[in-house]
Structures are given as C-alpha cells and as structure tokens.
Image (tube, coloured by chain):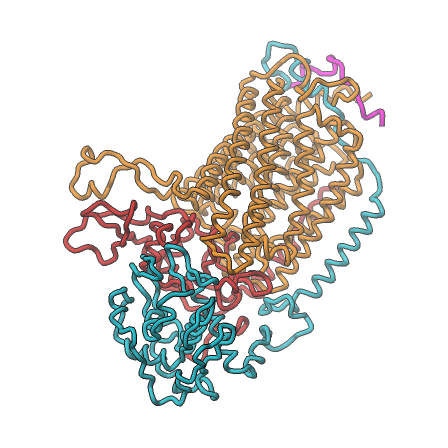
C-alpha cells in the first residue's frame, strides 16, 4: 500500500493559466492551493471479501425477520390490529381478548366489583388518582373523604351533577370544577363505581345499588347545574333514598354490615341481573354507547 | 507518480464550486444559529413554562376602554408566536431543513463535483435553488410562528412554503442527474451512490408526503403512516446517505488509504436502501394501524443492523492502524465521532423498535434523546468535519485557529453527550413511572423529569457556544482572514510519521 | 453498478418497495373506511364533528398541542394507557377517519387526549386550565394559553362566559377575561374528543 502515500506534488504541478484558478490574490498560487496540493489521492475501494461471521450474522437476522413477519402480521388483515392473533385465524370478525365469552359465566357479584374498578379507571382516576388520594390543592381525595363515606344520596348526587368549587373535603378547600356524569354513565356503572370507591383504600361503607342511583337521578332530574357546597349540604345528612318499588332488586339493607374492602360483595341487582326495569329510568339522558 | 494535472484538476473543480457551496454553507450556519436559539428557548420553556411568553405591546383592553396610547404605554402582553408549540416546530424545521439540509446540499454538491471529476455544471441553477431554498425556509418559519403550522411532524411548513422548498429541491435533483450524466470517470465510487440516491429520493418523499397529508389528505391513520414513512425517511434516505457518503469519502481521503472493501460498501448501501425505507411504522407501535404495517416496520428496523454493522466494519477496518491521526486532524476527528455515533444510534434505534422495549420508551424523552443522537452526534458532526475539510479549499486560506476548532469540538462533543444522557435517563425514568398507573401524572412524573430537562437546557448552552465559535470562524474564512502561511491547522503538533 | 441506468433502476426499485408497502397498500387497504352504523341506536361512529369543534382542531394544530399530547390509546399488552384510564379500549383506524390532519402525536409530556372530552367535559374547567394551567393542575408544566383570551372592561353585567380567575392572573377590577373565538373553538374540540364507543374491530370490555 506504499503507493497510496503520495508525496505532495511540487509547485509546478499546477498550471496557473487554467481558467478559474485565479483567485485575484497577491500571494503565490502554490500557497493558495496548499490545501489541494497536499491532499491525498481520491478515495478508492479495496477488495477485501466480507468476513464469514458477518455472512452468518446477516443470514441469521434475515431468518429471524422472516419468522417474525410471518408470525406477527395478523394475516395482513385490515381489521386486525392485534399482532398476537395469528395469521391462522382467517375469516370472521377478529375476536377481541375473548373476555365477552367468559363474562357471561362470571359470578354477578364479582362482575359488579370488576365493573366498578374498570369504570373508576376509565372515568375517575385521571383526577382522583389510582391511590384515591387526589392531588393536593387541586382534586380532593376519595380515601377517607367524609362525602364518599357519608350519606348515599349526597355522594350519588355529586357524581350525577358534578361540583363547582370552592368545596371543603377533609379540612382542605378545593376550588375546582367537577363535571357532571349524568349524561355519560348509566345507573349500574355509577353504582359500581361508588361501591368500589366506598370500599377501596381502607374505605368501608355500604354498597350502592343501581336502583338507588336511578331514584336519585329521578329526584334531581330538573337540576341542570353542578352542586355548590351550600346546595349540597342542603340535602340532609340522614336523607334516605326511596327506591322505586317496581323493581324486585335486593334492598340495600341486605348488604353485609361490614363489607371487607377486598370483597365488597355488593347486592347485585337481583339474580336475573340487568333487569330492564332497573336500567329503564336512566334512558333519556344516557349516551348510546355505554 | 500520479499525473501532475491531478491537483490542478481538483483546484479547478473546487474553484467552480466556490460560490454555490459557500452559499449553502453560510446559509446552513445562519439557520443553525437561528435553530439553536429556538431550541434553547423551547428547552427552557419545557421546565419553566412562563419563560418568554410575553412581548411588549400596547394594552388593547385599556385602550379600547377609553384610555389613550400615551396614558397606557406599552406593557408586556401575552402573544401567540412565543408559545412552546410554535417554537418547537420552528426549531425542528430550522435545524432539519435550514441547517442540516443546507449543509447536506453543500457537501453533496462538492462531493458530486469532485467524484464526477467535472467542474460544477450550471452553477446558476444551484445558486438559484439555494436562494429559493432559503426563501422557503424563512417563509415557512414565519408561517409557523404566525400560527399556520400544519402540525404534521417534519412537515410543519404551511403548503405555500413547502411548494417553494419543493421547487428548490427539484432543481437540485435535476442538477445532480445532469452532473452525473456528464461525469468524467469510469468508476462510480461508493460516496457517489449515496449522494446521488439521496438527491433522487428526497423530492419523491417530500412530494408524496405533502400531497397525501396536506393537499389531498387521505384518511387519518393512513396519514399517520405516510407521515412517519416520510419522517423517518428524511433521516434514513436523506441525512443518512449524505452523512455516510461523506464519511466514505473523508475517511480514506484524510488517512490516504483505500476503503477496506468494495463488497461491504455495496452490501451496506443496498441493504440500507431496502430496509431503511420501511422503518417509519415503528413510530406508531400500539397505534391505530393493522398489525402487519407495524410488524413490517419492526422487522425492517431490526434488519437495519445489517447495513449498520457492515458499514461500521468497513469504516473500522479502513481506520485500523490510523486511529492516531484522530489526535491531529479536525476533519477526521469530527467524522469518526459521527461515524461511531451512527453505529450506536442505529443499534439503539433497532432496539427501540422491539415491541417490549418500545412499550416503555415510546412517548418519552428517550425518543427525543435518540433523535438528537442521530441528527447531531452523527449527522451534524459529520457535516462539521466536512466543512473543516472543504472550506479551506474553497476560500484559499487555512483555518485561523486550532484553539477555536478545539473549542468547537469539545463544546459539541460534551454538549451532545450530556444531552443524550439527560434525555435517555430522563426518558427511561418517565417511561417506567408512566407504566405504573399509581404514579400521579402531574404530581409525581412531571416533577421527576424536570431536573433532566434542566440538564438538557444546560447541555444546549454548551452546544450553542460551539455553534457561535464555528460560525465566527467560518465568517473569518469567507472574509479571507484565514491564515496563509504554514501547513494545515492541526489539533496538536504533528510528528512526521503520522502526518495526516 | 457503474452504469447510470442500472444505478437508477436500483434506487427506484428499493424505494418503490416501501412506497408501495407503506403508502399505497395502506391507502388501498384501510384508506376508505366508512362510519360504522350502530344498529341499536342508529348512531354513526365515529360521530362527525360540529363546525366549531372542527375549527378548534385547527387551533389545536396551530399551537402545536401534538408535541406534548398524543391521541392514541395502545392496547393493554402494549402499554399502560388503559390502566391509566385514558380510554375504554385501544384506538383503531376507524377512529380517525374525520381527522385532517391526524393528531396521533409521539410524545406524552402531558396526558393522552383521545378521550379528554369524556374524562373532563366541563367547558369552564378547560377554559380555566388553558388560561392558567397550574391553577387547576398544580405542578403542571403546560404553557399558559393566555393569548387565546381577551381582557375587556365590564360593561353592565359581567359576560356569562367570563373566566373565574383568582390570584396573580386575575384582571384588575372593572375588567374581565373572556375567551376569544379561537379559545371557544379549541375547548369545543377538546370536549368533542371522545372515543369510548365500541367498534366491531375494537369492542369495549364491559
């Protein structure tokens, strides 16, 4: 490779008469083009072969790529977004996580508890947090909150209509806005969420049934604005809910007096669960996709 | 002995490139400074949202309420053009199109002329394209600040600015084909493949993305994949080929020995062309796209290991035994820094496409760290290296000060190193905390990432110092204030046996 | 390889592969999705946006909201999105057929907004939050969007949509802060963001 190391060309190598070489400079042409003159030769390529180990590694990678592409492409279907559902499943709508099938067989009490947790995650958690502690000074805590653990009517009313601060919880004032969930969530979901909230993070209180939510919803149907603290406190602390007698749901009194947080065992709306009568009262305000 | 006309020919070619290439370099550095300013302000806004939100303006409410302008003098008012979202878009576009692309065109033009062994043809076309290019970027950034951003990442320029840029780009592409067709050499060196391909691919990319997302929009999720097909290909099929091509030229040129293997060059190039172009979908893992689109992109991202390792082996074997030259040659040190970063950042990129890792790294500062790793530690460093080589040949004088070059190198190297560390670690912390739903978003995760963002701002100050130093040095060169005696500028006194 | 034609054929061939695969094929395969008609209640999903919300999406774009907020919910096995309560199901292609441009986003400096209109549908809250984020979300690093609001002298009764602001951002006595058209449109857009409905390709796990 000795011939690669070219000695720098002599000054006379450059022809000053060439057009364009003139920089209108005073100093010598050699000096101006020193950088060009001392340059090494233009690059070329050697012809070393590709090492065997590299060939091997490349082949292995390509093999892996083919396998991965074949296994996780979901049959190249437009409606399959889940790469785990194999190409083998062809035809028919792509099934989800098959939860629909098992849900039907599930114990209604467990299903109700699960619904409460899931709906809390989807609707409440971003403000009140998974820990139920809220955010200091911004969103009040649910854990140990006197409203969560207190009168059922008040807490149902809060969820239905929302709140307009300032509002005092556990001695701290929160000046914020809580939205109304009346048009968003049906009675069963609100009941499940509240039952979950009243029995999580060390909270212990009676469960709430969809019938109770329906009754409160009907009672305050004419109210269109969120609660202020004063308005809410106007509901007596010992107010009771008159559950519509039409349903044959288990009365709330049947609930265990001291439900354990782990298994609140709520009084599910009767064995023949979502009975049309129980769900009916919510219909007007409900959104179509609950 | 080589023919004595070799050096004369090179001098002649360099002379023909002088005006257009220096124009592109100068505007690149201008946009680099502008982009750095946007970057610093954006970065500070991220941990201090009240920073620079107001500008001095008359108090309109009081004025309308019956006051006179004299009674209510100018006060600080909130303005839209200073908001984070517009500054961030301006930063990205100023550095991606203003700095990196202008530098890439400058370097590409010079490399084309050198490797085709013909003086620059149609210099007026190149210069006109350069002027249009700068107008397009200026109009585009003004549009973003005025609130006309398209909000499509990497394509924020409003359509009228995109049109100007597209025309400028098409002119460069036409020029490149013309240059190549009139080349005076038999052998097409590997650098030429990369540069030519980049000039050929980019206009196609740019046109497709602008048409399908902005002019005649396709449906939302198709827009998303077109967006990232484009966004990733700006890196993969535009910056990367120019950067790698430049490294393929500069490394053997400076150390004076041939590139290790033609076969490795060829495999590296064609596998890059084949795989990199499919990578875009890895920005949408978990997103609303059918499984096959994402899976195809993941496979292609992992396959990128092939061109990267092949190229790394090729460069390493070429450099072997010559690493000592890194002590002396500024060009070589910048370029080798960039080439090594390319290997690392590409392997990191392949790993980030793996579904189980992406689950954590996606949507965090980790990705931002990766982007700066690629565009700065690799591409920008290579461009700096090229400029250190090319500018003396165009200006006819030597860099004025080894001290300034040293300052530039270490400010850039430490700055980008600390930035990558801050964003990578901060991003991992952020991703791991997000994965735990019990962690409060605003209450816990935001405060935890904030120190890392402050660290990023500080590293940005280091980078800014390097940029200002380099721009100053460049201006001295253009003003013909460089040195005229003695040899080239080295970092250290050169011992005879390793003289680069 | 040295011949110009061969070289260009190579450039073209490698590139067209990805163009066909990542641009044309997706467009043909799922670029023409229609709204899904839910036969139970005769509702088309995703519902079309109102004019004001559509305008709000332009405000969302102009101010670079996407740089900190995503609008995509990943499935449970591919991230924490569902566990954080950001949605009832993963999002799929059909959810975005009305989006021009798309706002999927790539960064979560702030939370995901796919279903923000479901989680927080109070217009008053959104205005307060946009005007002074830290007052309703302590520790937030969201930039204040005060420039989307206007200070004006109270003439007669205060405007119904005036913001209830206390503290350092409050206007001087006799003045009030009201949203501009842009702010109203933006909030209408945010409140409209709601993809909780089930789709056949993405059922909601009740």
Q: Residue at x 65, y 60 (%)?
A: B295
Q: Is residue B19 magenta?
A: no
- From the rendered image, report the letter of the chain displayed in red: C
Which of the 4 image quadrants contains residue A100?
A: bottom right
Left or right: residue B125 versus residue C41 is right
**Depth check, front residue: B425 or C54:** B425
Where residue A219 appears, as percent x and y from the top left, is 28, 78
User: Is A18 covered by the magenta stretch?
Assistant: yes
Query: Along the line of sight, which residue is nearer the eye, B292 or A284?
Result: A284
The relative height of residue A170 versus residue A6 in the rendered view (above or below) is below
Residue at 53% x, 66% y: name it. C90
Q: Is residue B412 above or below residue B156?
A: above
Residue B277 screen position, x and y as percent: 64, 51
Instruction: Give the residues in magenta.
Output: A1-19
Rendered colour, chain B:
orange
Is residue B192 in sight in this rendering? yes
Q: What is the display colour for chain A? A: cyan
Please determine whether, in this image, residue A152 is positioned above or below residue C17: below
Q: Quadrant of residue B115?
A: top right
In front here: B69 or B477? B69
Give the residue furthest to the left. C156
Identify the residue shown where x is 48% and y is 63%: A130
Q: Please identify the quadrant where the C terminus of chain B is shown.
A: top right
Locate the N terminus of chain B by quadrant: top right
Dominant SS in magenta: loop
Q: Position of residue B195 (x, y in %)?
A: 66, 39
Residue at 59% over, 66% down: A81
Q: Position of residue C71 (x, y in %)?
A: 48, 59
């Amino acid at each position: 490779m000795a011939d690669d190391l070219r000695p720098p060309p002599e000054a006379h190598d450059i022809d000053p008469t060439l057009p364009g070489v003139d920089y209108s400079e005073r100093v010598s042409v050699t000096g101006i083009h020193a950088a060009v003159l001392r340059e090494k030769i233009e690059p070329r390529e050697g012809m070393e072969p590709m090492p065997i180990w590299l060939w091997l590694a490349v082949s292995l990678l390509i093999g892996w790529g083919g396998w991965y592409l074949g296994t996780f492409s979901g049959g190249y279907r437009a409606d399959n977004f889940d790469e785990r559902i194999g190409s083998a499943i062809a035809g028919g709508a792509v099934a989800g996580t098959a939860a629909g099938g098992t849900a039907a067989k599930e114990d209604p009490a467990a299903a109700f508890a699960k619904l409460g947790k899931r709906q809390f995650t989807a609707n409440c958690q971003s403000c009140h947090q998974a820990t139920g502690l809220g955010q200091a000074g911004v969103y009040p805590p649910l854990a140990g909150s006197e409203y969560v653990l207190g009168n059922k009517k008040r807490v149902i009313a809060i969820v239905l209509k929302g709140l307009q601060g300032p509002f005092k919880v556990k001695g701290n004032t929160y000046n914020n806005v809580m939205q109304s969930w009346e048009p968003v969530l049906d009675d069963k979901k609100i009941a499940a969420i509240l039952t979950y909230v009243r029995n999580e993070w060390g909270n212990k209180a009676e469960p709430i049934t969809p019938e109770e939510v329906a009754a409160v919803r009907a009672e305050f149907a004419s109210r269109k604005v969120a609660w202020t603290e004063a308005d809410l406190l106007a509901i007596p602390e010992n107010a009771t809910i008159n559950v519509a007698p039409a349903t044959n749901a288990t009365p709330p009194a049947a609930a265990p007096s001291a439900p354990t947080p782990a298994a609140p065992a709520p009084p599910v709306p009767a064995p023949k669960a979502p009975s049309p009568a129980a769900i009916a009262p919510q219909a007007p305000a409900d959104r179509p996709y609950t | 002995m080589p023919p004595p006309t070799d050096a004369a020919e090179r001098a002649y070619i360099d002379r023909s490139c002088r005006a257009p290439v220096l124009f592109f370099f100068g505007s690149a550095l201008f946009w680099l400074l502008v982009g750095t300013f946007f970057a610093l302000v954006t970065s500070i806004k991220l941990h201090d949202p009240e920073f620079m939100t107001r500008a001095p303006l008359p108090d309109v409410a009081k004025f309308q309420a019956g006051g006179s302008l004299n009674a209510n003098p100018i006060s600080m008012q909130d303005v839209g053009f200073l908001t984070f979202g517009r500054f961030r878009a301006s930063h990205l576009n100023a550095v991606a199109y203003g700095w990196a692309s202008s530098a890439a065109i400058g370097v590409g033009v010079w490399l084309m002329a050198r490797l085709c062994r013909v003086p620059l043809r149609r210099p007026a076309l190149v210069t006109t394209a350069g002027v249009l290019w700068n107008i397009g970027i200026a109009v585009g950034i003004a549009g973003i600040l005025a609130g006309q951003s398209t909000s499509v990442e990497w394509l924020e320029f409003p359509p009228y600015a995109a049109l100007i840029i597209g025309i400028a780009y098409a002119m460069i592409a036409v020029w490149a084909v013309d240059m190549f067709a009139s080349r005076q050499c038999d052998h097409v060196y590997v650098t030429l493949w990369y540069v030519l391909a980049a000039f050929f691919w980019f206009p196609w990319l740019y046109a497709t993305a602008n048409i399908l997302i902005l002019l005649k929009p396709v449906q939302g999720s198709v827009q998303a994949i077109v967006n990232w097909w484009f966004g990733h290909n700006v890196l993969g099929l535009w910056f990367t080929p120019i950067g790698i091509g430049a490294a393929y030229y500069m490394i053997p040129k400076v150390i004076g020995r041939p590139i290790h293997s033609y076969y490795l060059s060829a495999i590296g190039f064609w596998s890059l062309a084949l795989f990199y172009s499919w990578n875009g979908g890895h920005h949408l893992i978990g997103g609303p796209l059918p499984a096959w689109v994402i899976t195809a992109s993941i496979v292609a991202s992992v396959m990128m290991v092939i061109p990267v390792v092949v190229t790394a082996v090729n460069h390493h074997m070429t450099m072997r035994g010559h690493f000592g030259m890194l002590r002396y040659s500024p060009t070589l040190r910048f370029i080798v820094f960039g080439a090594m970063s390319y290997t690392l950042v590409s392997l990191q990129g392949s790993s980030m496409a793996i579904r189980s890792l992406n689950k954590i790294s996606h949507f965090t500062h980790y990705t931002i760290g990766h982007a700066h790793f690629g565009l700065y530690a690799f591409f920008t460093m290579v461009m700096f290296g090229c400029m250190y080589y090319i500018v003396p040949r165009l200006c006819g004088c030597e860099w004025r000060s080894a001290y300034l070059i040293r300052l530039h190198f270490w400010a850039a190297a430490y700055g980008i190193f600390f930035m990558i560390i801050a964003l990578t670690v901060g991003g991992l912390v952020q991703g791991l905390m997000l994965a735990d739903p019990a962690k409060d978003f605003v209450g816990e995760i935001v405060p935890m990432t904030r120190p890392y963002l402050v660290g990023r701002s500080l590293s940005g100050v280091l980078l800014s110092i390097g940029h200002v130093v380099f721009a100053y040095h460049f201006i001295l060169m253009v003003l013909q204030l460089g040195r005229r005696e003695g040899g080239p500028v080295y970092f250290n006194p050169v011992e005879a046996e390793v003289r680069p | 390889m040295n011949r110009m034609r061969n070289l260009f054929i190579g450039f073209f061939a490698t590139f067209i592969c990805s163009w066909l695969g990542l641009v044309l094929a997706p467009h043909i395969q799922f670029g023409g999705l229609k709204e899904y008609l839910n036969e139970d209640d005769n509702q088309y999903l995703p519902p079309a946006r109102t004019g004001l919300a559509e305008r709000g999406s332009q405000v969302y774009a102009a101010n670079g909201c996407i740089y900190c907020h995503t609008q995509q919910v990943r499935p449970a096995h591919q991230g924490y999105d569902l566990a954080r309560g950001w949605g009832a199901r993963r999002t799929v292609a059909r959810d975005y057929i009305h989006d021009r441009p798309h706002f999927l986003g790539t960064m979560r400096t702030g939370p995901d907004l796919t279903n923000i209109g479901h989680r927080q549908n109070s217009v008053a809250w959104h205005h307060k939050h946009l005007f002074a984020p830290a007052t309703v979300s302590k520790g937030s690093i969201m930039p204040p969007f005060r420039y989307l609001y206007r200070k004006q002298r109270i003439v007669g009764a205060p405007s119904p949509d005036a913001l209830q602001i206390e503290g350092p951002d409050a206007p001087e006595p006799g003045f009030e802060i009201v949203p501009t058209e842009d702010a109203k449109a933006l909030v209408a857009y945010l409140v409209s963001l709601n993809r909780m409905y089930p789709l056949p390709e993405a059922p909601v796990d009740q």
